Amino acid sequence: MREICRRIKTNMYEMKGSNEGVAAIEVILILVVLIGLVVIFKSQAVSLVTKIWNAITDGAGSITG
């Protein structure tokens, strides 16, 4: 029983200093937030891009003559 407790204690100390997986979790959380923002603001983004694209194409006609 003492051996099991000692092994558990040793493993807990080793895991305490380990940062494995933290970077992966950060990347996943950032992606989740970005995807959420895209879903929420999709219509506004499409409208903005359409307006910008129309302004570019209208302006290009005056440049090329």
Image (spheres, rainbow, N blue to C red):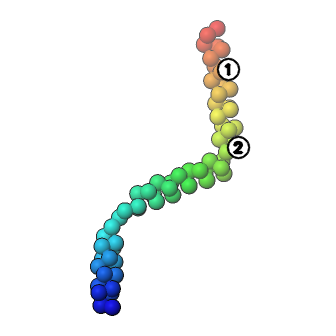
Looking at the image, which residue sits at the far top? 65
Give me the residue at 59% from left, 50% from top: 35
- SS category of the residue bearing label 2: helix
Element carrying mark 1: helix
Q: Which quarter of the figure has residue 61?
A: top right
Residue 53 seen in the current view: yes
How many residues crowd mark 1 within 10 Å: few (<14), some (14–19), many (20+)? few
Q: Residues within 10 Å of mark 2 (few under 14, many from 20)?
A: few
> Residue 7, percent across and down?
31, 81
Q: Nearer the viewer, mark 1 or mark 2?
A: 2
| Kind of residue sitting beneath label 2 | Ser
Q: Quadrant of the N terminus?
A: bottom left
Residue 33 sits above or below residue 60 on the image: below
Task: Report the amino acid beneath label 1.
Answer: Asp
Q: Residue at x 35, y 64 (%)?
A: 19
Q: Residue 14 falls in which quadrant of the image? A: bottom left
Instruction: Judge left or right: residue 24 versus residue 17.
Output: right
Asked if 9 appears above or below 54 in the picture, the reply is below
**In the rendered image, which quarter is residue 13 located in?**
bottom left
Q: How many marks?
A: 2
Q: Give the CA separation, mark 1 to mark 2.
A: 22 Å
Residue 9's mark? none
User: Does 10 sit left or right of 38 as displayed?
Assistant: left
* Residue wearing tag 1: 58
Q: Quadrant of the C terminus?
A: top right
Taking the image as drawn, is residue 9 in sight?
Answer: no
- Residue highlighted by disc 2: 43
Tell me if residue 33 comes above or below residue 63 in the rendering: below
At a point 33% along the width and 87% down the height, the residue shown is 5
> Looking at the image, which residue is at 34% across and 77% down?
12
Comparing 58 with 36, the one in front is 36
